Amino acid sequence: MVAIGWPAWARPQCRLPSIDVPACAGVDQPFASSFCFGDRCTGTGTVRDVQAPTSPFELVGLRVDGPLGSRPVAEDDFPVVLLPGETMIAELTVRLTGPGSESGTITWVRSGLLRDDRDDDEDREDNTCTASITASVPACRADPANPCQDRTCEAGACVTVPVDGPCGNLCQSGGTCVDGACVGGVPVDCADDNPCTVDLCDLVAGCVHQPSDAACNDGDPCTADSCGPAGCVNTPDPAACDDGDPCTVDSCGPGGCVHTSTGSCDDDDPCTSEACALQHCFRGVSEAGVPCGHGGVCDGAGSCQPG
């Protein structure tokens, strides 16, 4: 008997998209993979075998769907000829034990022959179509800030469900869960008796005490004001009174900063003259030849030099 087959250029095109399977832990999740010949299953060919994925995937059954209805396919039925309009369906299932993902493949071995009674594996590798499979279980974690809600897996996705009963959190105690919210109860007292902290309650961190230096301002410009663990700290800071005027001496007094005028800003240079005005020190340079002693811009003979 002569086997009539497809020439290499005319072999049916293999189009098998990857399969993503959303699943929940501990639940058998069914899914399917399908195979046919030609564009929109209009071709004809022979399926020689179906290589099932390994654990945790399981091949449950095979069938052919087409214009004439549906028929089951058993292992002894191979090779199976698919006519135009017919699709072979592989029914599979997967069970994962916890959050994460598992991968596998399902391979359809085709010959593209109208009749195929050969026992050898000639051209088998070139005539396989493989679909990759990825099953994933999400990690559903409840919000620790809301004891009246839980997160659970349904159809491979995390959903929020309400929880009944008494409730409380870091900011509230003695409440009752109603429609996913904690109502009633008594707020937690976060007061730390420190006058310079802003006391708040955070649902995740609990009581929070935020230092506020502004609350420690004593109105005295001679002090540096800050909030410490025991309360306000007002540290004397003479540098805070510096008015930038070279003609004053700056100091802290009982009522605040004191700026004492000196009326002079002499730089001890005999070849310059200084005068205070408008919070500035104005300097002039003596003419050349003016007696000056030694130092400054004096020459060795004791007279000022230009510049």
Image (cartoon, rainbow, N blue to C red):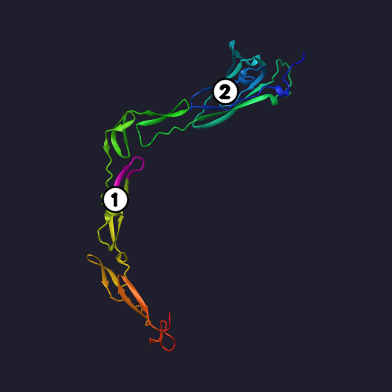
Above or below 212: residue 201 = above
Magenta includes 206? yes
What kind of element bears circle 1?
strand
Residue 197's tag is 1
- Mark positioned earlier in the residue sequence (1 or 2): 2
Q: Report the span colored magenta.
A: 197-207
Q: Residue at the far left: name it.
A: 255
Q: Amino acid at mark 2?
A: Glu
Query: How many neighbours does mark 1 have within 10 angstroms: few (below 14), some (14-19), or many (20 or more)?
Result: many
Q: What residue did someone put label 2 on?
A: 58
Q: Quadrant of the N terminus?
A: top right
Q: Is any part of residue 229 visible from this angle?
A: no
Please tell me in which quadrant of the rendered image residue 229 appears: bottom left
Position above or below: 176 against 236 = above
Residue 149: x %, y % from top left: 37, 31
How crowded pointer 2 is (Cα within 10 Å; few <14, some 14-19, many 20+) is rated as some
Please say if 252 is above or below 193.
Answer: below
Instruction: Name the side, left or right, on which 130 lies relative to 250.
Output: right
Identify the element where label 2 is drawn: strand
Q: Position of residue 153 (x, y in %)?
A: 45, 28
